[in-house]
Image (spheres, grey):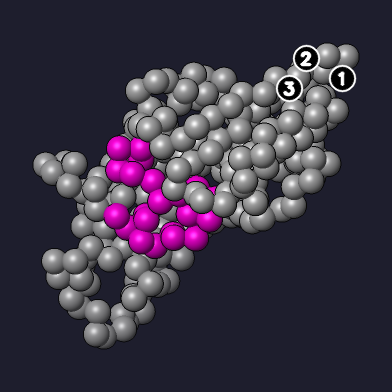
Amino acid sequence: IANSIWRRHLQPKNPLWKQVVAQSFIVKDRSGTAHVMAIVDSRLSTIGLVGYFGATTEAAGVKVLEQACEWLKRRGLQDVYGPINGTITSDYRFNLSDDCRIPGEPVNPSWYIDVFHKAGFDTFNRYVSGIAKNPYLYVQIVTSKKLITGFEHITLRAFSTKHPKKDLATYHMLMNSIFPEQSIYCPIISLAERTFNMATQNPIFNTDYCYFLDDGDKTIGFIVAYPFEDKLVLKTIGLLPDY
């Protein structure tokens, strides 16, 4: 699965390559086989990235990471974040489980985390997923109560199939405005990059399950989801800080 994603993302037509300089590092010896790509993004002045990591053993993995970090250090970068596969915004982390339960989540052996720790990396962020057993019952309880007044001007609308490019640009603007802290390790990406990433990651962005919140003529929030087997996966919910 990871290899198929890499093949798509490493295409020359990916807009990412207009922004970065990348160097591959490979270890293939008695310790095992490993690969990683060191990435210098022109939009990150002090931060280097490592991504597209794969290893057959811990020893080989640690060795290849150390080589990549040394290369980034020689280029004057103070910190290294990883694994970050360029600007694929769903691949800036590791999965703690060995199996891929939901599309769009990273695919990796759990021992990859130990490799990064042994190479000198610390945990930067943690993400948690939850399951709602009776979501429709919860909706019934919420909607049965009297809504708070003062929000009548806020409306909910579906993703426009008549103006998909406009709403895609709106979604992009909201993502960059609502989640600026993501730029710490993944820069505020361009619309061209986000469009390319989303086009190669179906069904992660499903316009049938994308809704916006509008305050008059201003779009202030969104929710993106997609169906998987007998579940609905709520992928991202965002609201502008002012609201």
The C terminus is located in which quarter? bottom left
Look at 61% across and 47% down and name the residue there: 77
- The magenta region covers 173-194
Which residue position holds label 1? 31
Identify the element where label 1 is drawn: loop
Which residue position holds label 2? 28
Q: Nearer the viewer, residue 175 or 137?
A: 175
The amino acid type of the residue labelled 1 equals Ser
Q: Of all residues shown, which one is farthest toward the bottom? A: 149
Q: Position of residue 15 (x, y in %)?
A: 35, 32
Look at 46% across and 35% down and name the residue there: 20
Can residue 219 be seen here? The reply is: yes
The N terminus is located in which quarter? top right
Marks 3/2: CA–CA distance: 7 Å
Position of 101 with respect to 207 (left or right) is: right
The amino acid type of the residue labelled 3 equals Ala
Neighbor class of circle 2 (other Cα within 10 Å; few <14, some 14-19, many 20+) is few
Neighbor class of circle 3 (other Cα within 10 Å; few <14, some 14-19, many 20+) is many
Identify the element where label 2 is drawn: strand
Check contact, mark 1 vs mark 2: CB within 8 A: no
- Residue 175 is covered by the magenta coloring: yes
Look at 47% across and 23% down and name the residue there: 10
Check contact, mark 1 vs mark 3: CB within 8 A: no
Q: Earlier in the sequence, mark 3 or mark 2?
A: 2
- Residue 52 is covered by the magenta coloring: no
Which residue position holds label 3? 34
Q: Nearer the viewer, residue 91 or 128?
A: 91
